[in-house]
Amino acid sequence: MNEIAAALPAGDIAAALPAGDVELSFEFFPPKTEKMEAELWDTVTALAPYAPRFVSVTYGAGGTTRQRTHATVQRIVNETALDAAAHLTCVGASRTGILEIAQAYWAAGVRHIVALRGDPPAGGGRFTPHPDGFENAAALTAALKRLAPFEISVAGYPEYHPDSVSPQADIDNLKAKIDAGADRVLTQFFFAPEIFLRFRDRVAASGIKAELVPGILPIANAAQAQKFAAACGASIPPKLAHLLEQLDDRPEMRPLVAAMVAGALCQSLYAAGVRQFHFYTLNRAPMTQALCHMLGRRAAAGNDTALNRALYHAPVPVQ
Ligand code: FAD
């Protein structure tokens, strides 16, 4: 055995594997139907043993899922010990209306908001603030911090936001959100490690000290990748596009390739010193579980304290 180990080349795969010293968060979207709710709950239950720092629940484009987001976050708070973060956008509501939602979250025991500007409903063109609304995520962040000592995460764009006039303007906007009180940046997804690493350099150069957490979206086929990329401006490297070719017609290969691509991305980021990861789960457990595993994280065993804490906890006190 030792001879075999000695014969392995330096930089063998085992040596390169992450040690599990990572911090994870998982993003879900609010389910539309009872069946989807059951699937989401199976997913939450399956992922809780990986002991994420927090899980977050999105707010539908155009502010369309207000009730469902609230109900999902509330259920996580009531039935698990996971830290739940509610996404909240500025779309289609007055400042008072948005702060009432935030106040209700605080009363329900939610202490973490992902503060976003949001987008108009599909086909709605550019964002226009509500006449009495917040103009952007920085203004929302400042108001939330005045309302209560929420932990606040905001969005960052490694390939810069389509509305920004330049990459530097986008960084300035990010800095404004941090200066307004945000604690953490969760990034838009991207498909090449150097895109994130260059962004990390620009963020550091601007003096931003907040945590910068890459958002990881496993992609399963070319059509899906193009759809997501078109929606947010993320680029697909030509080699990756080539890798995804033909998977549209081969569903059985898709999860295997998606896991390998996302796993390689995570491992490259890990090798570059990244220790925090935010997974866009799409409300499914297996892919996220596989990525946790590849990052060295194991699920807590059935009688483990972390698992019990995550699944069966005392209700959060309401202030
Ligand atoms: P902001 O940071 O306010 O602004 C976005 C861009 O607009 C800036 O980069 C800047 O270029 C420009 N801009 C802003 N203010 C000004 C100004 N005063 N003058 C000039 N330019 C300005 N969307 C949802 O609807 N629901 C969600 O749950 C959701 N979750 C998300 C989670 C993550 C991690 C990420 C990365 C995105 C999410 N989004 C969500 C998408 C997000 O709402 C959109 O990307 C939206 O277009 C921008 O939101 P923001 O908070 O980044 O906006």
Image (cartoon, rainbow, N blue to C red):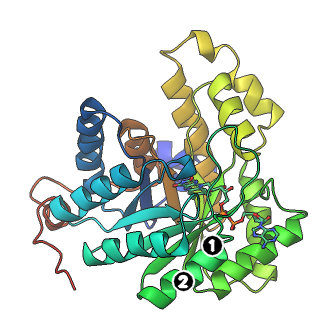
Q: In the image, 294: left or right of 105?
A: right
Q: Nearer the viewer, residue 121 or 154?
A: 121
Q: Which residue is mark 1?
A: 134
Q: Are marks 1 and 2 in contact (CB under 8 Å)?
A: yes
Determine the image quadrant of residue 154.
Answer: bottom right
* Crowd class of label 1 (few under 14; some 14 to 19; many from 20; radius 10 Å): many
Determine the image quadrant of residue 314.
Answer: bottom left
Circle on res. 143? 2
Residue 5 x %, y %: 49, 47
Q: Nearer the viewer, residue 286 or 180?
A: 180
Q: Nearer the viewer, residue 234 or 144?
A: 144
Q: Quadrant of the C terminus?
A: bottom left
Q: Quarter for ligand 1?
A: bottom right
SS assignment at label 1: loop
Q: Earlier in the sequence, mark 1 or mark 2?
A: 1
Seen as rendered, the residue at the extreme front is: 131
SS assignment at label 2: helix
Residue at x 70%, y 25% (from the top left corner): 243
Q: Is residue 180 above or below residue 295?
A: below
